[in-house]
């Protein structure tokens, strides 16, 4: 009986420690221009970047426009205290190239190097 209590106590301590490690991370920032992801256009405005650290999912959402939402499977990256969105100017449109948030990032699409680019930083 004593062994079971000790095992349950250690399990609960380990669960608390792991829940502290696997917390979701969130950043909010203003993107001053409209942009495209694949064929979807996103308007200028305030966006949230969140990372589900348990599953490695990076999400981008706009509270004012619920249809403007995108999620990617992230890959581990160097630890940062901020989030960045990297864009390429193609014609008269900005195209989202990659998102980096905390210690996760999305993989940039393969393609030609763009001569005009923009980066938006979201402080934590």
Image (cartoon, rainbow, N blue to C red):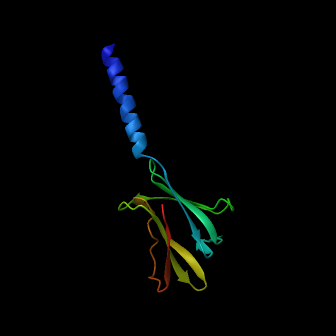
Q: Residue at x 36, y 29 (%)?
A: 11
Q: Is residue 67 above or below residue 118?
A: above
Q: Position of residue 112 (x, y in %)?
A: 45, 82
In the image: residue 112, left or right of residue 93: left
Residue farthest along the left direction in this orientation: 3
The image shows residue 43 at horizontal and vertical percentages of 66, 71
Q: Is residue 37 above or below residue 2?
A: below
Residue 82, located in which quarter of the rendered image? bottom left
Q: Position of residue 69 (x, y in %)?
A: 61, 61
Q: Quadrant of residue 95?
A: bottom right
Where does residue 7 sit, x and y in percent of width and height?
33, 23
- Most foreground residue, 68 or 48: 48
Give the residue furthest to the top.
Answer: 1
> Taking 1 as reference, is 37 left or right?
right
Pick the residue in front: 31 or 67.
31
Q: Residue at x 44, y 66 (%)?
A: 107
């Amino acid at each position: 009986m004593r062994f079971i209590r000790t095992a349950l106590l250690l399990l609960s301590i380990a669960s608390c420690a792991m829940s502290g490690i696997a917390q979701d991370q969130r950043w909010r920032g203003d993107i001053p221009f409209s942009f495209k992801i694949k064929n979807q256009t996103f308007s200028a405005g305030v966006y949230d970047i969140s990372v589900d650290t348990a599953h490695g999912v990076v999400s981008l959402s706009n509270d004012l426009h619920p249809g403007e939402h995108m999620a990617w499977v992230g890959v581990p990256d160097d630890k940062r205290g901020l989030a960045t969105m990297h864009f390429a100017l193609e014609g008269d449109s900005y195209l989202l190239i990659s998102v980096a948030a905390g210690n996760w990032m999305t993989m940039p699409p393969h393609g030609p190097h763009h001569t005009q680019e923009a980066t938006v930083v979201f402080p934590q």
